[in-house]
Image (spheres, helix red, strand yellow):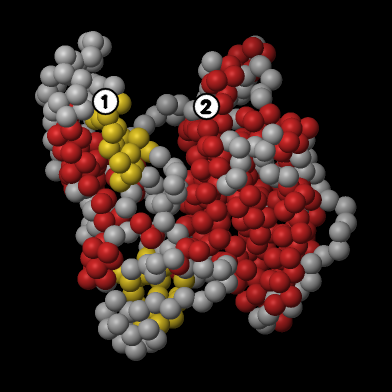
Amino acid sequence: MGTARQAAGVPSPLVGEGQGGGEPRRAGSPPTPNPSPQGGGESDLERAHSAAAAVVDPEIPVLTLADLGVLRGVERRGDAIIVKLTPTYTGCPATLAIQLAVEAALAEAGLTAARVDIVLAPAWSTDDITEDGRRKLRDYGIAPPARGAAVRSLFAEETVACPKCGSTDTSRISEFGSTACKALWRCEACAEPFDYFKCL
Amino acid sequence: MAASPASLGAHAGGNPTAAPTPLFTYVLALADDALVLGHRLSEWSGKAPMLEEDIALSNLALDLIGQARLYYAYAGEIEGLASGAGRTEDALAYLRDEQVYSNVLLVEQPNGDFAVTMMRQLLYAAFMHPYLQALQRSADTRLAEIAAKAVKEMAYHLRHASEWVIRLGDGTEESHARAATALDEIWTFTGELFEMDAGERDLVRQGVAVDRETIRPIWQATLDRVLREAMLARPADRWMQTGGRKGRHSEHLGHLLAEMQVLHRAHPGATW
């Protein structure tokens, strides 16, 4: 959790929330005289979206939430702005860290009425990682997931290119790696071990 | 120890007096299966036969505990709708006693040697993978969503366990003997995977739960394929152990829960 807060550069994401600090809040007040969706609300939504999209994954700090494809939308519900996130792996400890980091980023942007909702459907897939995200992963030394790999048949073999030398003469050491999202591979050409993104 | 019956009841995790709804009972059983097996696998952390497997087993445990959390949170919401006071996922996991845990006996069996752990994992995952595939079409949206998430992880569990059972069964004389013994010893716990009480049968009719009997041919076909390659054979049908779903457990669950729950019970409500 400390990591997430440091990543967002804010000491505590939760302090101040719901206390009316920062921007004026309208909680409990009747609808504003200007109910138009364009009436200032849209820019708040956009700011919330940019703030959340720029948060980085605590375990793969080169990827933003936008790259990862876990940001599932930002919407207004009553007075609140709801940022919808979806978890990558159900048991991934980074899910909470990411949620706290997004709350911190929203607070930093002065959006005190914004909160995070975790949504399950549609279930996240490694296909949701953007092209930009895939390039960043490769540069970082992690082989990006093959597209459509999640639907391969149960016992089919995969071909994975080494992120260091590009050779496809690689072999799997273990389908489970240092975090919930990585597998361990080895390149037979350059003899380097490397991480491969675990396909879902 | 000198507590009155009333306070004793309250202490036992605040088990509500109102009869639980069939949906609550059903979701809780899914949760208990996942949590107990997840905890069992976590016992390998730090002492698996090799580093890669240590990491793999911890990953599997994490997946299952993550899935259990989704089920517990939902069970608590169902209970809240029915009684006005639903328990949290922590209360359901940490403050219920052995007699109200409804996991199947298979998942609470001790890890044994590596062959027992992998065989138990194969028998469970070969059932749960097609079960979750079917549950994705549940009339209950939340269950369908959880299943769609969990089935992807379960594919990894099934592949991992299958590869190990093949490696052990088709390995050395020693590993083959151990794999065969493991299969023979825990086969008797597989009958419970197909048990459904009246409440669950009602949920099947409503399209909420999956008819476990429809999973049997898929489960058997997966096992046959893996076991044949492992130079092993699926045991013949025989008398099966039962009781877990009704809270009648083997001696092993009490020890597991004691270790899992002691910290939470010693420091109620503690956070960090």
Task: State the SS at label 1.
Answer: strand
Instruction: Name the mark nearer the viewer: 1 or 2.
Output: 1
Q: The disc numbered 2 marks a residue on which chain? A: B
Front-most of residues A196 and B185: A196
Q: Residue A6: image x %, image y %?
A: 18, 45
In the displayed structure, would residue B15 be above or below residue A179? above
Q: Is residue A66 left or right of residue B49?
A: left
Q: Quadrant of residue B248?
A: top right
Q: Residue B232: image x %, image y %?
A: 76, 74
Q: Which residue is mark 2?
A: B77
Q: Is residue A86 visible?
A: yes
Identify the amino acid type marked 2. Glu
Q: Residue A14: image x %, image y %?
A: 23, 30
Task: State the SS at label 2.
Answer: helix
Identify the amino acid type marked 1. Ala
* Disc 2: CA contacts within 10 A as few (<14), some (14-19) or many (>=20): some
In the displayed structure, would residue B75 be above or below residue B192? above
Q: Farthest residue in the bottom direction? A: A189
Residue at 41% from the left image edge and 56% from the top image edge: A125
Q: Is residue A16 left or right of residue B197?
A: left
Residue at 55% from the left image edge and 60% from the top image edge: B155
Q: Quadrant of the N terminus of chain B?
A: top right
Residue at 26% from the left image edge and 25% from the top image edge: A80
Q: Residues under labels 1 and 2: Cα distance?
A: 23 Å
Q: Residue A170: image x %, image y %?
A: 40, 82
Front-most of residues A134 and B184: A134
Q: Quadrant of the C terminus of chain B?
A: top left
Q: Quadrant of residue B10?
A: top right
Mark sitting on residue A113: none
Q: Which residue is mark 1?
A: A80
